[in-house]
């Protein structure tokens, strides 16, 4: 089992390094390096609008992708073929996105927009296959809640290190490759620097997927064997009829959107408010260390106060972090302290949501009579993509409206611009977090105890049905 835990953690490491790069730093690349100068704001707006619109359209296909994964039957299982194919294509797509597409961004912007749209659509589809197949492996690795918690914990441990590791290496890598390929010096962020950074992340994502591909194994159980093929016309029905999945999904969407928006805008805070973008790298070190502490604590804390306590209590702690953010001003130390308090509960809240979604597989099977692993687990990646799409648009809007683009200096940001920026990075996310906690507290009733009861009922029901079928066959033979 140690090999499987490690392999799953490595896969999560590469996967979330990719996710953080795509959803947090692509908008920064577009506004600070890809389009600079006259008309850059409009061109950046077109690219980010395309990203948001394409993702919103493609989100509707995620449950269908989950259905395709559910219906896959190969010698190596139903998840691994999609995991590998998705990793290869999405990594290549990411590298192309962090480029000028062979100079088209300069020579022919109209053609650049067209080619970029095609590249992004292909990348996003295969990323969805990878995302859904990776996380929907959880209910296939075990039906036992404790074992699932361990897989979820090591997975989140790896993903935390991956996403926060990007924060640590992004500026050093961008600057290093900028100097290496362009011959420039100092705190320079060139297209070549961003492209080199994207190549590194693409390779990390692919290697992580290979570790999971070769190091994990699906388990066989009575409950998993009682699975029917999912018709595409029924995938949305499967999700819609699972009330616990729907309420948890709504709560998690608000939570994810608030976190991603704030996290994405922090680099702008350090660059345009504090005036020291290099100091942002420390955030990655702080959060990586906190992730190493926070994630392993999840099984211990959840055993004491349940997932509900972790989810709602964690959000309360994040709100304290937001209050400190508002008083930080230009103090880097205060920003580090505020971010530490803000981030510490995040991995545990994610795990609480992920485990609840995973348990809703059996809940849906018990309630509706069919088991749909990938369709059900596709909701979490779908929500993260939705949050990422909205955040990309929000980040660009916030940056443009606040005047935080190009080589603008902190002293050039107006009081009105600063208010707009604070509204996007702090005030709006705080409201979303409060609503998220209220929904989970009063609408999500699928507890650990209830899930254990459902598993017992399912096993008893399936055994009874199998016994009846065996009796019927025996009677027919006579």
Image: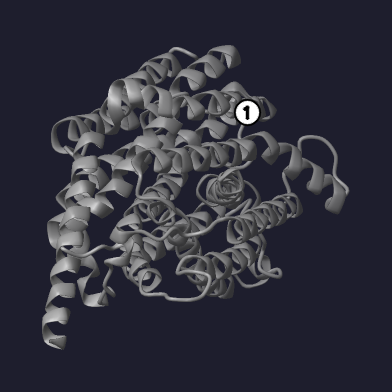
Residue at x 62% of width, y 62% of height: 91
Rendering coords of residue 225 (x, y %): 32, 66
150 on left or right of 215: left
Q: Which residue is mark 1?
A: 280
Rendering coords of residue 140 (x, y %): 40, 57
Q: Nearer the viewer, residue 407 or 52?
A: 52
The quadrant where residue 331 appears: top right
Q: Nearer the viewer, residue 323 or 421?
A: 323
Q: Nearer the viewer, residue 443 or 271?
A: 443
Vertical position of residue 330 compared to residue 238: above or below = above
Residue at x 37% of width, y 40% of height: 256
Residue at x 67% of width, y 63% of height: 100
414 on left or right of 282: left
Q: Is residue 253 in view from this perspective? A: yes
Vertical position of residue 212 compared to residue 234: above or below = above
Vertical position of residue 227 compared to residue 280: above or below = below
Q: Residues within 10 Å of mark 1 (few under 14, many from 20)?
A: many
Q: Is residue 415 in view from this perspective? A: no
- From the image, which quarter does the C terminus lie in? bottom left
44 on left or right of 302: right
Rendering coords of residue 356 (x, y %): 29, 42
Provide the secondary structure element on which disc 1 rests: helix
189 on left or right of 153: right
Residue at x 84% of width, y 52% of height: 182
Q: Residue furthest front?
A: 478
Rendering coords of residue 128 (x, y %): 45, 63
Q: Nearer the viewer, residue 205 or 176?
A: 205
The quadrant where residue 452 appears: top left
The quadrant where residue 58 appears: bottom left
């Amino acid at each position: 089992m140690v090999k499987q835990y490690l392999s799953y953690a490595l896969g999560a490491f590469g996967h979330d390094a990719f996710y953080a790069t795509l959803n947090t730093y692509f908008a920064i690349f577009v506004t600070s390096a890809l389009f600079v100068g006259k008309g850059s704001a409009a061109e950046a707006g077109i690219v980010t609008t395309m990203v948001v619109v394409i993702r919103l359209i493609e989100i509707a296909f995620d449950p269908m992708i989950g259905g395709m994964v559910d219906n896959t039957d190969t010698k190596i299982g139903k998840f691994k073929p999609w995991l590998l194919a998705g990793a290869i294509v999405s990594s290549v797509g990411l590298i192309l996105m962090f480029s000028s597409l062979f100079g088209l961004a300069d020579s022919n912007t109209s053609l650049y927009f067209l080619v970029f749209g095609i590249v992004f659509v292909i990348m996003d589809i295969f990323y969805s296959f990878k995302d859904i197949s990776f996380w929907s492996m959880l209910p296939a690795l075990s039906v036992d809640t404790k074992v699932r918690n361990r897989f979820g914990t090591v997975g989140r441990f790896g993903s935390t290190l991956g996403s926060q590791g990007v924060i640590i290496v992004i500026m050093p890598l961008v600057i290093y490759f900028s100097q290496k390929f362009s011959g420039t010096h100092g705190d320079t962020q060139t297209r070549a620097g961003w492209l080199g950074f994207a190549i590194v992340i693409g390779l990390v994502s692919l290697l992580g997927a290979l570790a999971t591909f070769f190091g994990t194994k699906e388990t066989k159980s009575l409950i998993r064997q009682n699975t029917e093929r999912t018709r595409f016309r029924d995938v949305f029905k499967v999700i819609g009829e699972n009330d616990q999945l729907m309420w948890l999904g709504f709560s998690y969407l608000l939570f994810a959107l608030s976190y991603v928006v704030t996290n994405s805008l922090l680099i702008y805070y350090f660059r345009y408010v504090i005036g020291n973008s290099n100091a942002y790298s420390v955030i990655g070190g702080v959060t990586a260390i906190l992730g190493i502490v926070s994630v392993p604590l999840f099984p211990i804390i959840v055993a004491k106060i349940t997932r509900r306590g972790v989810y709602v209590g964690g959000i309360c702690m994040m709100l304290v972090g937001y209050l400190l953010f508002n008083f930080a001003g230009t103090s880097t130390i205060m920003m580090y302290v505020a971010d530490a308090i803000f981030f510490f509960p995040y991995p545990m809240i994610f795990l609480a949501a992920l485990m609840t979604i995973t348990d809703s597989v059996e809940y849906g099977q018990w309630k509706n009579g069919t088991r749909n692993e990938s369709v059900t687990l596709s909701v979490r990646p779908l929500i993260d993509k939705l949050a990422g799409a909205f955040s990309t648009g929000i980040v660009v809007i916030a940056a443009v409206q606040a005047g935080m683009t190009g080589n603008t200096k902190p002293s050039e940001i107006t009081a009105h611009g600063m208010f707009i920026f604070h509204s996007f990075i702090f005030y709006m996310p705080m409201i979303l977090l409060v609503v998220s906690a209220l929904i989970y507290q009063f609408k999500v009733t699928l507890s650990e105890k209830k899930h254990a009861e459902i598993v017992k009922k399912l096993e008893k029901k399936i055994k009874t049905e199998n016994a009846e079928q065996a009796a019927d066959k025996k009677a027919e033979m006579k």
